Amino acid sequence: MNVTVCRKEHFNAAHRLHNPHWTDEQNQNVFGLCNNPNFHGHNYTLIVKLTGPVDEDTGYVYDMKNLSLLIKAEILDKFDHKNLNLDTEEFQHLNPTAENIAIVTWQRLRPHLPETYALSVTLFETERNFVEYHG
C-alpha cells in the first residue's frame, strides 16, 4: 500500500519573463509586467511529494529530515534570494516561468531519490497561481 509524504519549503527569487527571439512589443504583450527589464520577485512556496510503500521497519515512506536536506541542497541553496535569470545556470537560456521552475526542481531532485518513489512538485508563485509537475 502506497502513501504520499509531503515537504513544504519557501524561497524568494527574482526573475524576468522574456523571450530573446521576440520583439520588445511581443514580450510586453505576452508577459506584461513580468517582462520588467529590472526584474521582479516572488515568495515561492514549494511542495515536494513522494509516494511509495511504508517501510515495515521504520514506519516511514521516506525520512523527512533527509528529504528536507535534499531540498535545501538542490533547490533552496541554488535559488533562494537569487535572480534566476542572472544567478543560476538552469535559467541562463530557459525562461524562468513557474512551469519551468517546477520542471527544473523535479529534474534536480529525481536523480537523488530511489526510482521506486513517485515524485511530484507543486510550486506556488502566488497564493492563487501554482503549477504541478509529475515527471
Image (spheres, rainbow, N blue to C red):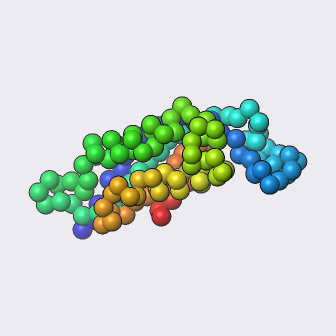
Image coordinates of residue 57 in percent, x first then y, are 11, 57
Question: Residue visible at 76% across and 42% down?
Answer: 35
Above or below, comparing residue 10 to residue 104 in the picture = above
- Left or right: 106 as drawn, with respect to 130: left
Question: Residue visible at 13% across and 60% down?
Answer: 56
Work out which quarter of the rendered image holds the N terminus and state it. bottom left
Above or below, comparing residue 73 to residue 102 in the picture = above
Q: Is residue 82 visible?
A: yes
- Left or right: 102 as drawn, with respect to 65: right
Quarter of image, res 37: top right
Quarter of image, res 34: top right
Q: How many marks?
A: 0
From the viewer's side, name the closer residue of 7 and 79: 79
- Left or right: 95 as drawn, with respect to 90: right
Above or below, comparing residue 61 to residue 83 in the picture = below
Image coordinates of residue 94 in percent, x first then y, are 64, 52
- Left or right: 8 as drawn, with respect to 43: left
Question: Residue visible at 52% across and 53% down?
Answer: 104
Question: Residue visible at 45% across and 39% down?
Answer: 76
Image coordinates of residue 124 in percent, x first then y, are 54, 45
Q: Is residue 42 visible?
A: no
From the viewer's side, name the closer residue of 115 and 131: 115
From the viewer's side, name the closer residue of 29 and 86: 86
In this view, the residue farthest toward the left is 57
Image coordinates of residue 93 in percent, x first then y, are 66, 51
